[in-house]
Each structure stands twice: as structure tokens, then as C-alpha cells.
Image (tube, rainbow, N blue to C red):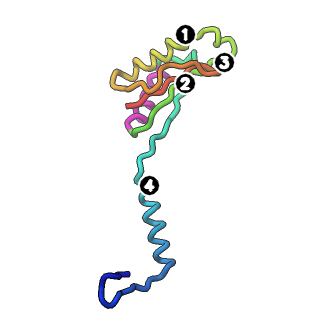
Amino acid sequence: MAAKTSPPVCKITDFGKFQYQKEKQARLQKTSQKKSGLKGIRIGLTTARHDLELKTKQAEKFLGKGYKVRIEIVLRGREKAFQQLARQKIEEFKSLLGSDVIIEQQISRQPRGFSMIIGK
């Protein structure tokens, strides 16, 4: 409606069509938003070096897409006694990633092991 004109002009529209266009515009805005997601990678205490290298490639792929990556090392049973080895394994994983990653959260103790969050 244009109230400043003389005489006032009003446009008659289909309300269903108007509502559909508003919903479509809202969906487009929602899809164009950047989502800061978190991806997880789990390693074990006995994970071999080659497997770590494969998982670092996966982590680099996630980082390239803009995700943050949580690296978890799960300790089961008797492995819980070897916490220092678990920390060394996460440090080894971090060194394989390279120096261009940003550590969002340092290595922290979790109920089932250790975790660390990295970003780019």
C-alpha cells in the first residue's frame, strides 16, 4: 500500500503466494549460513602409524571444509593405566597434521580417555 499518493493505492495479492515467497526466502537464508560444525576422529592407544596418517588426511579434509575437529583417544580397561602414552599418541597425531592448525582446546582428560579440538 502506498499511503503518500493521492488517491491511496493498494495492491491485492494472493496471501498463499505471499506466504510461500516468504518461506522460500527464509529457507535460502538458512542454507547460505555458515555452520560451524564439529567433526570427530577417534584413535586408540594401539593405532598404527599408517592408520594415523590416514586419519590425518581425513582431518585435513574436514579442516579444509571449515569444520573443527575433535581428536579423541579412547582408553579401554587396562589401557587407562597408560595415560602418558595416550598423551604422546595425540601429540604424534598433532605433529602429523603440521604447524598450520590452531589448537582450540588443549589436551584434556575425559571419562573414557583424552580429547583435543583443533581448527584452521
On residue 31, which mark appears? 4
Per the image, is 55 magenta? yes
Name the residue tied to disc 2. 72
Q: For the magenta stretch, what is the residue range?
A: 50-64
Q: Quadrant of the N terminus?
A: bottom left
CB under 8 Å between callouts 2 and 3? no
Asked if 113 appears above or below 20 in the picture, the reply is above
Between the residue at mark 4 and the residue at mark 2, the CA separation in whole angstroms equals: 30 Å
Between the residue at mark 2 and the residue at mark 3, the CA separation in whole angstroms equals: 13 Å
Asked if 8 appears above or below 86 in the picture, the reply is below
Q: Which of the two discs, 2 and 1, labels the residue nearer the N terminus? A: 2
**Disc 1 on helix, strand or loop?**
helix
Per the image, is 25 magenta? no
Name the residue tied to disc 3. 76
Residue 37 percent location from the top left of the image: 48, 40
Question: What residue is drawn where x is 50% and y is 19%?
Answer: 107
Q: Is residue 62 left or right of residue 43?
A: left
Residue 67 percent location from the top left of the image: 44, 37
